[in-house]
Amino acid sequence: MPTADESAAPTRARGRCQCGAVEYEVRGALRPVVYCHCRTCRRTSGHFVAATACARENLVLLSARGLRWYASSDWARRGFCAHCGSNLFWEPLSGSYVSIMAGSIEGASGLTATGHIFVADAGDYYAITDGLPQSAAWGELSVPAGFPLP
C-alpha cells in the first residue's frame, strides 16, 4: 500500500480507527458495501461486517503506527489497530484489492449496500429483512467489475 507521498490521485474517502493510530485515504473507486455474515467476520467484529473495497494501490496509509495484520485464514488477513482494537481491513493474500470496514470511513461516504454473503452462517439472534440479495456463501452479487467480494 502506498504512503501519502507516493500517490497524487484525488481523495475519494478518508477513514481511521477509533484512537487515530491508523489513518487512511482511498484515492480511487470504492465498491458498494457488502454485508458478510461468515463466522470469522462475526468473531472479529462481534456481529456481521459491512465492507466496501478498493484497489490495493488506491488505499493510502497516512498513519500506520497502530496497524497490525492477523492471518485469519490460509488465504486472507485482517488489519486492525493494536491500540484501540478497531477492525479496519480484510485482504486476500493473492488479490488486488483491500476490503475496508465501511464504519471506519469518516463522514458521508455516498456508498450503498448491494447484498449479503455467507447468510448460512448468520447468527440466530437477528433477521435479514432489508430485501437485498442474499447468498449462502460468496455468491454472485451485483458488484461492479474489478471489485471482487467481500
Image (cartoon, rainbow, N blue to C red):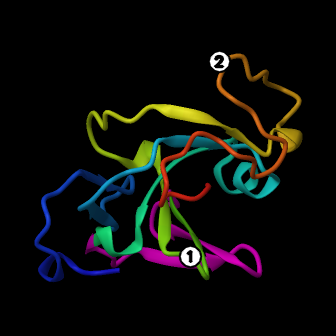
Asked whether, in this view, residue 29 is left or right of residue 116, the answer is left
Q: Residues within 10 Å of mark 2 (few under 14, many from 20)?
A: few
Q: Which residue is drawn at 17% across and 83% down?
A: 6
Q: In this view, does 97 lie to the left or right of 14?
A: right
| Image spot of residue 54 (x, y percent) | 40, 60
Q: In whole angstroms, how far apart are the C-alphas of marks 1 and 2?
A: 30 Å
Q: Residue 95 carries which label?
A: 1
Residue at the (30%, 68%) spot, across then down? 58
Q: Disc 2 marks which residue?
A: 130
Please count the marks in the image. 2
Vertically, is 99 above or below 30? below
The verdict on residue 122 being magenta is no
Magenta range: 61-87
Inspect this view and state whether residue 81 appears: no
Inspect the image, locate mark 1, and give the three-letter code of the amino acid beneath it: Gly
Q: Which residue is drawn at 38% across and 52% down?
A: 18
User: Which quadrant holds residue 134?
Assistant: top right
Q: Earlier in the sequence, mark 1 or mark 2?
A: 1
Q: Nearer the viewer, residue 1 or 136?
A: 136
Q: Which mark, by number, is residue 82?
A: none
Task: Give the position of the C terminus as an image quadrant.
Answer: bottom right
